[in-house]
Image (cartoon, rainbow, N blue to C red):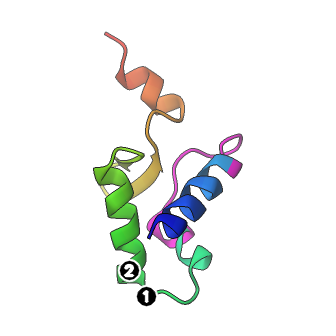
Amino acid sequence: MEDAQKIIVDFLQSKAGSKSKFYFNDFLPLFPDLKPREVKKILSELVKTEVMEYWSSGSTTMYGLKGAGKQAAAEHEE
């Protein structure tokens, strides 16, 4: 499980310059041997441990590293 989490975090960090939020389906190619449900469990664990966070547009849920992206800065303004 830790290896899988590292793969996801490395993937997100490698894309950090161009994109900060990803759809669930963006993670599936990283694990061709796993079922979607297993990938979802890995992502959920990363969210639970606050390495990643959910972002919702209302109709779609996306994933990103906690505190990454333009939206994160705007949400912490008062």
The residue wearing badge 1 is 35
Say whether residue 60 is visible: no
Question: Residue 31 lies in what quarter of the image?
Answer: bottom right
Observer-nearest of 45 and 55: 45
Quadrant of the drawing holding the C terminus? top left
Establish if 30 lies above or below 36.
above
Horizontally, residue 25 falls left or right of residue 14, namely left
Where residue 25 appears, as percent x and y from the top left, is 50, 72
* Dot 1: element: loop
Residue 3 at least partly seen: yes
Find residue 33 and report its image quarter: bottom right
- Asked whether 70 or 30 is in front, the reply is 30
Q: Residues within 10 Å of mark 2 (few under 14, many from 20)?
A: few
15 to the left or right of 2:
right
**Distance between the Cα atoms at labels 2 and 1?**
5 Å
**Which quarter of the image is occupied by the N terminus?**
bottom left
* Residue in the picture at 38% in, 55% down: 46
- Image-based side of 42 in relation to 17, left or right: left
Give the amino acid type for the residue marked by disc 2 in the picture.
Glu
The stretch in magenta equals 14-26
Q: Is residue 50 magenta?
A: no
Main secondary structure of the magenta stretch: loop
Q: Position of residue 14 (x, y in %)?
A: 70, 50
Q: Among all residues in the image, which is located at the extreme front?
A: 2
Q: Can you give x and y, in whole percent of width and height, for residue 68 in the image? A: 52, 35
Query: Residue drawn 31% across and 57% down?
Result: 59
Residue 25, relative to residue 55: is it above or below?
below
Badge 1: residue crowd in 10 Å (few <14, some 14–19, many ≥20)? few
Name the residue carrying label 2.
38
